[in-house]
Image (cartoon, rainbow, N blue to C red):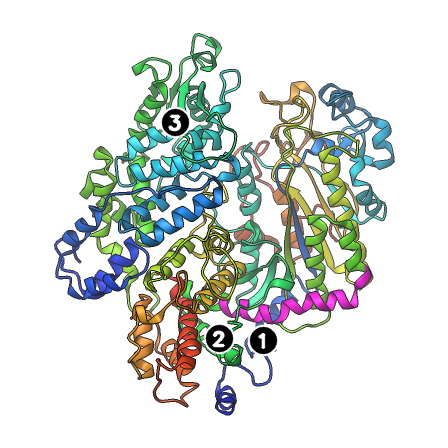
Amino acid sequence: MAITRRQFLKRSSAAAAGGFFGPTLLGNGWMHQALADTIGDRYFVLLFLDGGNDGLNTVSPIDNGGGLLRTAYDGWRNTGVGGINLSPGELSPQAIAADPGTGAQLGLHPGLADLKTLYDLGKVAVIQGCGYPDFSLSHDDSRRAWRTGSPGGTSSTGWMGRYLAANYVGTDIPAAGISNGVPGEFVQSATSVLTVRRVRDFRFPYDNSFRSDIDLKRTIFNDLHESARAGGQPSVLTHIGNAGTATLLSTEAYPALHDTYQLERPTWDQAYSDNSSSTSNDLREVAKIIYGVESGVPNVNARFFQVRNGGYDTHSDQGGANPDGSHFNLHNEVGSALKLFYDDLADMGAIDKVCVMVFSEFSRRIPQNDNGTDHGSQGPMFVIGGNVVGGTYGNHPNIEESALDRSGNTVYSQDGVDSFRSTDFRDVYGTALKHWLNMPHGQILTDVLPLDSGDPAEWWTTENFDMGFLP
Amino acid sequence: MGDANTLLTPAETRHVLKRTGFGLSKRDRRTAERNRKSRGAFVDKLLRAKPKSPRFKGDSFSNAQDAWLIHLSKTKAVLPEKLVLFWHDHFSTGIDVVARTGLMTQQNELLHTFAKGNFKEFVRAMNRNPAMMEFLDTVRNRKENPNENYPRELCELFTLGVKDLLGQPNYTQDDIVQIARAFTGWRYSAPERRDERLYERSEPFFEESRHDFAANYPERGPKTIFTTTGGFGPGGAAFDADGEGPSEIDTVIDILFAHRDSEGMNTIARRTAYRLLEYFAHPNPDLAVVDEVVATSNFDTTWNIKTLLRAILTHDAFYVTAAPAPFNASTIKSVKWPIDLVIGTIRALGMKLKVDRERGLRIEGGGRARLRSHLEEMGQELMNPPSVFGWDWEVAWLSSATLLARFVFARDVGAARGRGRNTFIPKKVLNLRLTDPDAIVDAVLAILGLSDQLSAAEHAALVDYLTDGGTLTSLDLKDEDTHDERLHGLFALALQAPAYQLH
């Protein structure tokens, strides 16, 4: 039996004898072209703060400057028991820059001390007041707006998905979600997105009672998917053929990334373990994959990643600067995990190739409720990386009572003369697409981020894809 | 072009049975060979099946999930279950928010009650379904600050849709605010025991002091909606036809169901027909087909789901995805839901499932995963959809992680050797006297409902597996090694084939 099986494997075109890596991906011309024209030898990581992060207690006014931000802040955010007020004393060590609109000195939440360290190195862009017009207070609606990059639209594809579809095809796996389902940002059907919780466990399921015919099963499995791909239609069958082959190849490449990383980067591996949070665990998976790409592991090509951290829906028990508070813990978890990831990638010599974008589906209500905050509107984003032009961008939202809407939320504005003008999150996306992912300006508008129509003071009708936080 | 009087071929009959049920049982395959009925007559028989709720037992949420899965694997009334799953996705509600198993099983019974009944009555009942009231905050909707959660989803997901099929808006934010006022004051009586025992029913009730009567809040004015959309004219539609109070949420339903889209057609009838066509027939159905099935069934006046479904199942559009291989550019296929894949496989292979008290409901195979965990990994945990939007269909079902979960399930089924329950016994569905490899592959594909769905190359690949790449010319399936290794292995590979992921 063994001899005939070997003969058969030799005859088979789909399985390269002596190894798992078929001809599908190696030396693939368009793959290299795609890299050269698009992201190049770089990485892009999305970190989604799920639940609605309280922006006012993430980037807070320390003083009034030439306006009234701090006075208004003290009016909305209580001190004492149940209060979530961050005092100037608590914020001062975390001072970043002055708000361009009001001159108020700004500070990061004390839980973000590690992020502040990176900020001081000039590696963090803090982008204030990010949102979109006609904003929704529904988690689902607002997540959909941020994921699709098309607020109010009916698009079923993700904003990064449309970028990927424009630049990649077939069984290549340019993106990975550290998740079970495809992250909404990556949804499309032109190319394969790897979704994996832990690379170590991403193994192909063979029948352990009969391991003798594994090579044969592997060949037949691949033949079935290659045939579906070769048929070329209908597109859904091609998609399954692509995804099946991509999954098979990934199961043969990705689990080893775990072993390699543990073996070759034990102190970093231990540091993530000591950090002991879901964000650091997830970012470690990204680090393992990047380390694999950097080491030239065959069939490991992912350069786009998505990681999610939940728990930001702080309707109650939000807390202030006290390390017991839930918001402090969330910030501390993400800040320290990002710093660790940054240092790890710097040690790998890859940090200049990495850009991390942090966002949430909305901010929270300006007045606090009993001891938390309800759903709100515009909030800050962070962009972090070795090549990021650090600093503070965009205006703080206007939190004075007269400026809030009936619910107590800040109002989205694109009015050019407004010193509280919002930053539309699509300008942040567009800047990354243009300056990090090398997508032509015009194509961003046609393929990924179509402009709104309507009153230019209230809708996103003029783009700014040159915000400056990426060179 | 066919209609309800068109006679069904055996292949079409198999298609009807697959799409209105879960896989093809041995009996289904026999029925398809013998059927001489027309589309209408055959479908009428299927539509007569009475919905029957699962027998929920045990005291945990996973017990309830297992009970539904067991029910799905056994029930003769498959078409109603297929509809219940559609409505579960449509009125998406999940345990993560609802938190009480009894509320979820109570809602499941409601889905069974109305599965093929009157859609308008269905929505009325859903307005005061405790699980839904919990899930979308109706219980937190007070006059001081009307909560828009349920009213928004009622319009957006359950009835009208944000936009009509022409892309025009169906309502405004003001409409939602007004409808939210109608829904103030509703609560439900929670069972007294705080644990998660099943069978305890919760009853909705109306609390006047929490309701937003116009008199209490005159500055809000009368409750009028659809002054700019819906075809009601500039005066819009007012709730006060039946007075204020508990009847308002029924009045809202009357108004919604009279809503007309930008072409003057009934908005809800069109959208519901569209969604059912997507589910039973194929993605992106033509608007002309939508209008035909609504007209044939008078769904816009009767709201009879069963009649609408008959119109769909006898329409040419329903038979589109039955196209045999080889496929071409105009071929349309639809991705199986994970629950279709799992239950369809179990039924096709004649597997008898039983819940193990200690280990839950699982296949005795290669892995240790419970059936519900398989489904969760595939992206479809029953009674816990990802959000109020329900599950994303079609290609969204297929990520590398969820595909891998499908492959794992296939492996576990293939490895489920043995004689007991929760195993796979090939001889129950396959003639083990077959010796010709081609014939064996054909028989296995027929069992899996894939008879005419594989390309010649895919078929050849499976034959290659049986013959070790052409080395063997015949097989003895009664030989223990051949049976346990090759035959079980063949089933696993066929279950992993791309075509098996599609309807």
- Find out whether residue A257 is within the magenta segment: yes
Task: Tell me where residue A403 appears, x and y as whole percent.
Answer: 65, 22
- Stretch in magenta: A244-267
- Find out whether residue A383 is within the magenta segment: no
Q: CA distance from mark 1 to mark 3?
A: 58 Å
* Tally of marks: 3
Q: Which quadrant is the N terminus of chain B positioned in? A: bottom left
The residue that disc 1 covers is: A28
Identity of the amino acid at label 3? Answer: Arg
- Give me the residue at 51% from left, 92% from top: A3
SS under mark 3: loop
Which numbered dot is residue B128? 3
Give above or below for B309 relative to B24: above
Identity of the amino acid at label 1? Answer: Asn
Which label sits in the foreground, 1 or 3? 3
The residue that disc 2 covers is: A222
Kindly indicate whether the residues beneath marks 1 and 3 are on one polypeptide chain: no
| First along the sequence among labels 1 and 2 | 1
Task: Tell me where residue B247 appears, x and y as whole percent.
Answer: 34, 18
- Give me the residue at 74% from left, 26% from top: A84
Residue A91 image-quadrant placement: top right
How many residues crowd around disc 2 within 10 Å: few (fewer than 14), some, or many (20 or more)? many
